[in-house]
Image (cartoon, grey):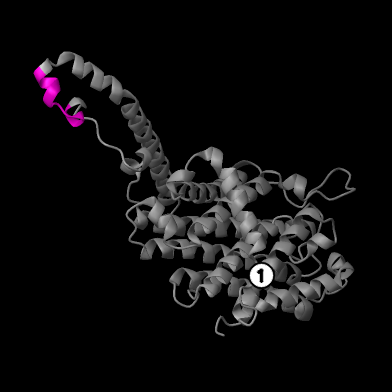
Amino acid sequence: MMRILLLTVAYIVATCNVAAAQMSLGLRQRMLTPIVVGVRRATMNSSQQRYATKSDLIQPSVTSVSRGGTAICDSKPPVKLLQWAYAAAGLATTAGWGTMAYTTIRDNQPAGAMMPCWQHPVFARIGAMSAASLILGSFASLAATCCESDAESWEELGDSSPSFRRQNLALATTGVASSLWVRFADVVTKIPGSNPVASHQSYSGIMQSRLIGAYGSAGLLGALVWARCLPEDSRNPLTWPKRIGDGVSKAIVSIAPKDVNDPVQVKYALITTSMLIFTGMQTVCNMPVSVIPSWTSRRLSRAFPIYTFLGAVTAFDLKEATENGRILVDKNYRYLSSGIKGFGALYLGARAGAICFDPSFPEHFGMVNQVPGLAVAAMLMVGLTLRSDER
């Protein structure tokens, strides 16, 4: 599967390079056309010039370039290959996240730090693995879009679903963020006041390379497809920050539902808002606030917001799909909706298991005990994910 993913990334890079070369060729041809015309006029006799048209004066080998010189390079996307690439990337990212959850939430992380009972890490890992549902739902939705698309160009593929470009960009962001977390895990999970300095996690060698490779290749796939599917007038990389900033700003002011009497629109608007709040709390707040909603103390509380961010993007896509009447029609939105529901089911199941079946609760949940109100509010908000998409 990883070989398919790398092959797809290589294909997209190659087509991008070909596109750039062909755009450059088209530009040179348009610049040289006046010179060619002048030279050929100079070599014609007077009778030839009298009846020569402009097309006669231009070299026949010069190919006309439409749409600003980029039509010739907008090749048909390999949708079948992309389906397999998204499947490989989804499995690789899920495996990477599972590895992080298993190797970070266990005894002797750091050496001598023991779990109070065997149930404690089990329910903590289940809660962390709720993010896997969001990962798989997102990649599955992109694969479904490719499966159902008959696009003749990359731009048409990007326009085939309103969520396609946004999900690719979100996965590119999560891939980069996850790679950075793996690289600096020893800093992010450092235990304050420890002497000598100790961390809950520190990756190196082959394990670090594999995790960064899994996350990085998935992120690169999302970034390349996003860039390849942009409209013709937005393919200049210098315009991308503006485009992304405009898109994020528009999304933020569009979170509110268009119809407050539609409970499904309201549901996804609230989920989007809560996921963004969770992301901000875990990213910028200090302990104990940042332990919500992950309940993983310093072990994964700074990694979990990577996927609550993905959850926010997914919920926003579903809100728009509800407003457009597509949520129960298009297959890609069904995958996104299943990812949100799976996240909620695993998360709430892990919380219920910790409260009811973990004998170390509540005395060994020190961080959560300091913010019980936030913990309850988080569970209530996540509970919205289990509501049906039927009105």
Depth check: give the residue in front, 242 or 369.
242
Relative placement, left or right, of 19 versus 385 is: left
Residue 187 lies within the magenta run:
no
Q: Position of residue 286 (x, y in %)?
A: 84, 55
Residue 387 in the image: above or below residue 54? below
Q: Position of residue 284 (x, y in %)?
A: 79, 53
Which span is picked out in magenta? 47-56
Residue 168 in the image: above or below residue 227? below
Q: Residue at x 51, y 46 (%)?
A: 220
Residue at mark 1: 256
Relative placement, left or right, of 128 versus 64 is: right
Residue 272 in the image: above or below residue 110? below
Q: Position of residue 247 (x, y in %)?
A: 59, 54
Q: Quadrant of the N terminus?
A: bottom left
Q: Position of residue 85 (x, y in %)?
A: 43, 54
Residue 49 lies within the magenta run:
yes
